[in-house]
Amino acid sequence: MLADFSTLPNNSRVWVYQCNRKLSDEEVAVILEKTTEFLTQWTAHGANLEAGFEVKYNRFIVIGLNQENASASGCSIDASVHFIQQLEQQFEVDLLDKMNVTFYSGEFIAHKSLADFKKMAKAKAVSPNTVVFNNLVNTKEEYLENWEVPAKESWHNRFLA
């Protein structure tokens, strides 16, 4: 069951998929359509899942699931990963690699491998105040409050010493 992401409770489970490049507006339109279709049919053991999503900055697909009514099962999580893999293939992008870092570089959003981010930190090209995207958030509340944070307030901090 598709819900408006903004109406999902703050304790809803979230998954953040970052893209290795900025998506075009045309690509985002297709992703909006396909994700709407997927979430409308998303179930766990035959029960409809109340889920919503948003696409942020033409780079991130954020899916939220209200677990108060029904929780995602192994099979439903597998289905969502399979859906994301289909998007990866269709748009020739990487959405599942958690070993990449996305952060603000001035007004632009940069995407680097973790190894490159470590090198940038060592070279002081990024600082503790560099705003990073903490894609390890688990709930909508964490997403709203701790997704875009200075590196010093995220797991990225370990690379800045």
Image (cartoon, rainbow, N blue to C red):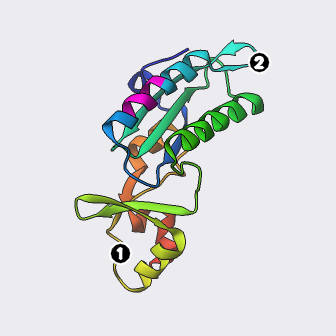
**94 versus 7 height, above or below:** below
Q: Pick the residue in front: 8 or 16.
A: 16
Residue 109 picture location, percent across and down: 32, 58
| Residue name at image x 50 percent, y 51 percent | 135
| Residue name at image x 76 percent, y 29 percent | 75
| Residue name at image x 40 percent, y 66 percent | 151
Magenta: main secondary structure equals helix
Earlier-in-chain disc, 2 versus 1: 2
Where residue 126 is drawn, which disc sits there? Answer: 1
Secondary element at image label 1: loop
Secondary element at image label 2: loop
Measure how far apart labels 2 and 1 are at the Cα level. 45 Å
Query: In the rendered image, which residue does mark 2 sit on?
Result: 45
Which quadrant of the view contains residue 66? top right
| Mark 1 residue type | Val
Residue 47 picture location, percent across and down: 70, 13
The magenta span reads: 28-33
Q: Does the magenta run of residues contain 32?
A: yes
Q: Pick the residue in front: 149 or 1.
A: 1
| Residue name at image x 56 percent, y 28 percent | 65
Residue 28 picture location, percent across and down: 38, 35
Q: Quadrant of the N terminus?
A: top right
Q: How busy is the neighbourhood of tag 2: few (under 14 within 10 Å), some, or many (20 plus)?
A: few
Q: Does the magenta run of residues contain 102?
A: no
**161 versus 90 height, above or below:** below
| Mark 2 residue type | His
Residue 91 picture location, percent across and down: 49, 42
